Amino acid sequence: MELDYLCIDIETYNVGSKPSPYTDNILMVSYVTADTAGVIVGGDWPDWLLGMLRDDKVLKIIQNSSFEAMFILHNYGIKIRNVWDTLAVERLLVAGDNISCALVDIVRRRLGKFLDKSLRDVISTGVIDEKTKQYCLDDSLVLFPIYEQQQKEIRSRNQEYVVELECLMSVMSGEIEYHGIGFDKKLWRSYVPILEKKRRDAERKVWDFLGFSYCDNLFGESTGALSLTCGSKVLEALSKKGIKLNDYKSETLQEYFYRNPGSLKGRIVSTILDYKRWDKALGWNYPKYIEPKTGRIHSSFNSQGTATFRFSSSKPNLQQVVKPYEDINFRHLFVASPGKVFVGGDYSQIELRILADLTGEQHYIDSFTKG
C-alpha cells in the first residue's frame, strides 16, 4: 500500500525578533506529495492542500513542525496530527552526540548533497522570485528521502512509539507557543517600585560594608563608586575585607553564605545575593514580551531543548520564573484565561521509578510498590 504523505515547508516574512503568526505573513509554501510538487505564493492555499493537512491518515513530513504548526493553526484553524518531524527524529537518532540537526547538515550527512541556504536572509525580507521559490521547494524535496532513511533506523531500534511521542510534542510545543499565557500587567507595575527599592536598599548595605560612598539624585536613585554588576570589582573589594571568592556566581556566593551564616561577612554576601536577585528580577521585564494583538506572552518552547530531552523555554524563559521571595511572588503574574485555572502536576520520583523498572531490581521495586 502506497504511503499517503505530504512534505511541506513554509517561508514567512519576519517582522519581529522571532517568528510569530500574529505579525508575520506567509510568503509561500512548498509541498511534495507522491504525485506532485510545487510552490504556492501567499496564504491562499487550495482546498486539496488544506484537506491533506486536516486528514490524520496523511503523514505530514516537516522539518521543525512546531513552526509550521503555529502558522497553520493561526491561518487555517487546523491542528496538524500524524507528523514526522525530521528535526525531532534526527535529534533522537544522534542523542548524546554533539551533532547539528539543521536541515542543511542532515541533507549533507544522509543524502550527500549541498542545500544552498544563501537566500535565507533574502526570503525573510519578503523577496519572491524564481530563485527564492526554488529555494523553498528544495527544502521540501529532501524531506521524503530523509524520512525513508530515518524510518529504517527507528524501526531497527524499535523506537516507533518514542518517535510518535517526540513528533507529537514538537507540534504541541508550537501550539503552546501560539496560545500563550496571560500576564497581569497591573500587578507587575505594582511590583516594579518595590523591586527597585529592595535592590537599592541591598546595594546601599553592600556599599556601607565595603566602605564606598554614594549619593542620591532628585529621583531617589543611588549612584556609588562601585557597580555591583561588575563582578571583578566586587570580588576585589570583598577580598580586601577578607572575603575570598573564586568567582561572582550566585552559586559561589550561596556556598560562602552557607559556610558563614551567622557572621558579618556571611550576611554581607547574603545581601549581595539579594541585590543580584532583585536586579535579575527587574531585568526580566516580562511586559516587553507581550504580543499586542493578544495581550499574552508567547514564549518559545522546545520539547528537545536539552541534551536529556527536557523541555526548554525562551523569550522569555517561563521555566525559570523567579521563585517567591519575601513579599514578591512572580508566579502570580501569570494568569489563566477567564473561567479557567492552572493545574500543577509532577511525577513523583519518576527517574528513580524508571531506574527500578529498567533494572528489574525487586527490592528497589518493592520500595515503591509496598512503601
Image (tube, rainbow, N blue to C red):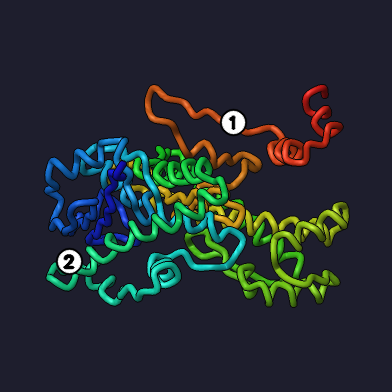
Which residue corresponds to the image point at 40% horizontal and 51% vertical from the top-left?
85
Instruction: Answer above or below: position of 145 versus 238.
Output: above
Residue 116, percent from left and from top: 30, 75
- Camera sees residue 367: yes
Local SS, label 1: loop
Pick whichever, 28 or 127, lies toward us. 28
Instruction: Answer above or below: position of 269 versus 194.
Output: below
How far is the residue under mark 1 from the one under mark 2? 46 Å
Task: Please tell me in which quadrant of the rendered image residue 252 appears.
Answer: bottom right
As drawn, the label of residue 345 is: 1
**Identity, as a three-letter code, of the amino acid under mark 1:** Gly
Residue 256, percent from left and from top: 82, 60
Q: Nearer the viewer, mark 1 or mark 2?
A: 2
- In the visual, does 176 lie left or right of 124? right
Residue 155, percent from left and from top: 51, 48
Question: For the N terminus, which image quadrant?
Answer: top left
Question: For the C terminus, which image quadrant?
Answer: top right
Which residue corresponds to the image point at 20% horizontal and 56% vertical from the top-left?
29
Q: What residue would you read off at disc 2?
A: 133
**Identity, as a three-letter code, of the amino acid under mark 2:** Lys
Q: Are marks 1 and 2 in contact (CB under 8 Å)?
A: no
Local SS, label 2: helix
- In the visual, does 291 lie left or right of 225? left
Mark 2 surroundings: few (<14), some (14-19) or many (≥20) residues within 10 A: many
Mark nearer the N terminus (1 vs 2) = 2
Mark 1 surroundings: few (<14), some (14-19) or many (≥20) residues within 10 A: few
